Amino acid sequence: MCVIHVACWALTFLIRNCYTVYLYIYKSYKFNCMVFNLSEQNSIANQFLAELRDKQIQQDSMRFRKNLERLGEIMAYEVSKVLPYTTKAIETPLGMARLNVLKSEPVLLTILRAGLPYFQGFLNFFDQATCGFIGAYRQEGEHELAIRLNYLTSPSLEGKEVILIDPMLATGKSITDSVKHLLKRGVPRHLHIVALVAAPEGIKHLAEELALPYSLWTCSIDEKLDDQYYIVPGLGDAGDLCFGEKI
Ligand code: URA
């Protein structure tokens, strides 16, 4: 009996993961999507992420917001490496220098409210970016989580490099619902989805639901979601840690 149980479990695990691997391969081929995980490399970014996760240190909300902003700056630098560039001649006091500079600034979008400090990190680097904001909140049912959008303002996205910033990629529903509405503002040249921490469930949901080319940028891929749809080990409620508990 026990052997049958283990065999069934192993088979289910294999089928589930085969499907995820298949999705990655199929979507990468069809839609050119890519996943970048910053914590695969050693860098000072891991120190900032460790402080964000630490339940003692994260009680200092100013430090929490500052670390989110610093990681936003680091991720902005990483994303900047794949944006389109053009060569520009610059006149210095002593001559001419030729440099590759951004062809155009990306559009920055963020989901309120936890996204704000992370978004600020991007805005610190993309000085002239036009920006959009999305208001979304969770409505937890007994067996599922619904995401309600109640505010959306955005510049045109047509033909633009669009960076959608949401620190916690949990179920992925706030991203897919937002993208559905955002596409009414034009089809981006490329969509960059930037999370701080991503759950495998959210990554899978994006792969299943998004039918346009996108890249996912994250500082860490965590283990799973808990039964309240929070990321484990994650860091807790990012919005509350930035701005205080809501009622
Ligand atoms: N939102 C958060 O703030 N934390 C999570 O773990 C998931 C969603």
Image (spheres, helix red, strand yellow):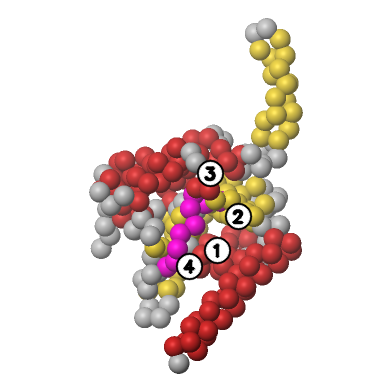
Which quarter shows the N terminus?
Answer: bottom left
- Marks 3 and 4, how far apart at CA: 25 Å
10 Å neighbourhood of mark 3: few (<14), some, or many (≥20)?
Answer: few
128 sits left or right of 85 in the view: left
Q: Secondary structure at mark 4?
A: loop
Q: Amino acid at mark 4?
A: Thr
Q: Which residues are magenta?
A: 217-225
Residue at position x 62%, y 73% in the image: 18
Q: Position of residue 199 (x, y in %)?
A: 48, 62
Check the image and report above or below for 127 versus 186.
above
Q: Residue furthest top?
A: 94
Q: Earlier in the sequence, mark 2 or mark 1?
A: 2
- Marks 3 and 1, how far apart at CA: 20 Å
Check the image and report above or below for 227 versus 163.
below
**Which disc, if any, is residue 41?**
3
Which quarter shows the C terminus?
Answer: bottom left
Can you tell which quarter of the image residue 112 is in?
A: bottom left
Q: Amino acid at mark 1?
A: Ile
The residue wearing badge 1 is 203
The residue wearing badge 2 is 35
Labels 4 & 2 near each other (Cβ < 8 A)? no
Q: Amino acid at mark 2?
A: Val
Residue at position x 56%, y 68% in the image: 205
The residue wearing badge 4 is 171
